[in-house]
Amino acid sequence: MAVRKFDLIQGTLDLLVLKSLNTGPNHGYGIAMRIHQLSDDELRIEEGSLYPALYRMEEQGLIESEWRVTDNNRKAKFYRLTRKGRAAADAELDSWLRLSKAVTRVLRGLEQGA
């Protein structure tokens, strides 16, 4: 049986991107690779999902961008959190933790025959 890679639950992409930018500015590919590596290769963010999310978050004022040169001497758009984005990331993290704890409680209860 093949191991299935996880699909992101709607809304978690924004949280992962915002929290990954908490450590400093990064370009889209760098954001995707950081999430992929930190998830032990379980989460793969596709360009078709990532860039629309980045553009949307920029329109919402959660992130800002500027063109810079990467370590590979290529021009790329670097994204950074705004104050509003930092607050949104913290609020989303709190919501995610509450949700994941509630789902865990339900699953454990069902396993125990509740």
Image (tube, grey):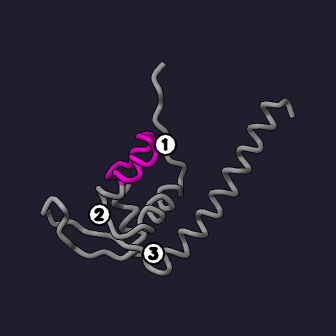
Q: Amino acid at mark 1?
A: Asp
Distance from Cα at disc 2 to Cα at disc 1: 22 Å
Pinpoint residue 61: horizontal percent, then vertical percent: 43, 78
Mark 3 near mark 2, Cβ–Cβ under 8 Å? no
Q: Which residue is mark 2?
A: 27
* Res. 98 image quadrant: bottom right
Disc assigned to residue 62: 3
Pinpoint residue 28: horizontal percent, then vertical percent: 31, 60
Q: Is residue 87 above or below residue 101?
A: below
Residue found at the far right of this picture: 114
Pinpoint residue 111: horizontal percent, then vertical percent: 78, 31
Q: Amino acid at mark 3?
A: Leu
Q: Residues within 10 Å of mark 2 (few under 14, many from 20)?
A: many
Q: Which residue is mark 1?
A: 7
Residue in the image at 68% along x and 54% along y: 99
Query: Over which residues does the magenta segment extend?
Result: 32-49
Q: Taking 108 as reference, is 10 left or right?
A: left
Describe the element under mark 3 as helix, strand or loop.
loop
Q: Is residue 4 above or below residue 59?
A: above
